Amino acid sequence: MRLLPILRRPGLLLVPLLALLAHPASAQTPAAVPDAACPPLLRHTLPRLQDEKPVNLCQHAGKVVLVVNTASYCGYTGQYKGLEALHSQYGPQGLVVLGFPSNDFGQQEPGDGQAIADFCGNTFGVKFPMFAKSSVAPGHGRSLNPLFVALAQKSGSAPKWNFHKYLVSRDGRQVIAHASAVDPKDPVFLKDLEKLLKTK
C-alpha cells in the first residue's frame, strides 16, 4: 500500500490526521444541553425582550434560577436594583436572574419591548436576561407563559402581583416562591438563595 510512505512525509498528511483524531468535529462544536440533563422546568424556548429572538432556557441547566415577573410602573419596581445586585454578586456562584415583564396586574407594564428594555437599562442598569412581555397568572384572558404555569404547579404559588419571585434549585426539583413584597435583600430570601447555591 502507498499509505505508509505518505504518512512518513513530514507535514503532508500525518499532522492533520492526528489533529482530526485528537479533536473530532463533534468535540469542536458546543453541544446543546441534552433533554436528560435539562430539568423539565427549564424545557421552554421563550422570546427575549430586545428582539424576540427565541432563547432555550436549558442553557441555564445546573444553575440556580431566579424567575421574576416585572413591571415598569409598580410600587415594587425599585426591586430591579436589588435583582441586578444579586445577578452581579451571585452570578459567579451559579445564579441567573430571569425577568419576565407582564401587564397582568394594574396595567403597570403598558409599553412594548423596546420601551421596557430602554427603561430597565437606562433607569436600573439591568444586565440580567429579560424576556418578551407575557401573561403570568390565570384570569387575564390571555394565554399563559408556560414557564410560570410550571412554576406555579411546582410551588403551589401563582403570582398575585408584580415582582413575585421563584427560586429554582440547580436540578429543578425544588421551587421556593416569595411574594412581591419580599425584597431581594430580605434576609429570609437571601437565606433560601444561598442554601440553593451551596447545593450542587
Image (cartoon, helix red, strand yellow):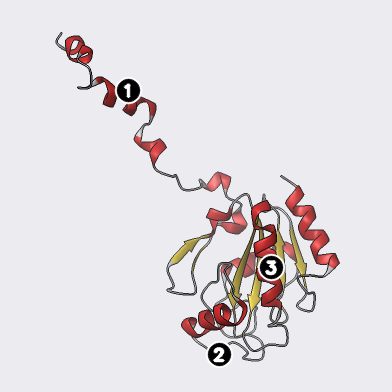
Residue 146, picture quadrant: bottom right
Left or right: residue 193 compared with residue 30: right
Residue 117 in view: yes
Residue 130, picture quadrant: bottom right
Q: What amino acid type is highlighted by mark number 3? A: Ala
Considering only order in the chain, which callout, 2 or 1, is on the residue closer to the N terminus?
Answer: 1
- Dot 3 lies on which element? helix
Considering only order in the chain, which callout, 3 or 2, is on the residue closer to the N terminus?
Answer: 3
Left or right: residue 155 compared with residue 73: right
Give the mark toward the camera: 2 or 3: 3
Q: CA distance from mark 2 to mark 3?
A: 25 Å
Residue occupying image coordinates x 55% and y 77%: 121
Residue occupying image coordinates x 75% and y 53%: 196
Placement of 185 over or under 113, stated as above or below: above
* Residue wearing tag 1: 18
Q: What amino acid type is highlighted by mark number 1? A: Leu
| Residue contact at pointers 1 and 3, CB within 8 angstroms | no
Residue occupying image coordinates x 66% and y 91%: 106
* Residue wearing tag 2: 110
Q: Which mark is residue 85?
A: 3
Residue 25, picture quadrant: top left
* Front-lying residue, 194 or 69: 194
Q: What amino acid type is highlighted by mark number 2? A: Pro
Residue at the limit of the structure toward the front, as seen here: 10
Q: Position of residue 184 (x, y in %)?
A: 75, 70
| Residue contact at pointers 1 and 2, CB within 8 angstroms | no
Q: CA distance from mark 1 to mark 3?
A: 48 Å
- Dot 2 lies on which element? loop
Q: Position of residue 180 (x, y in %)?
A: 75, 78
Residue occupying image coordinates x 22% and y 17%: 10
Q: CA distance from mark 1 to mark 2?
A: 59 Å
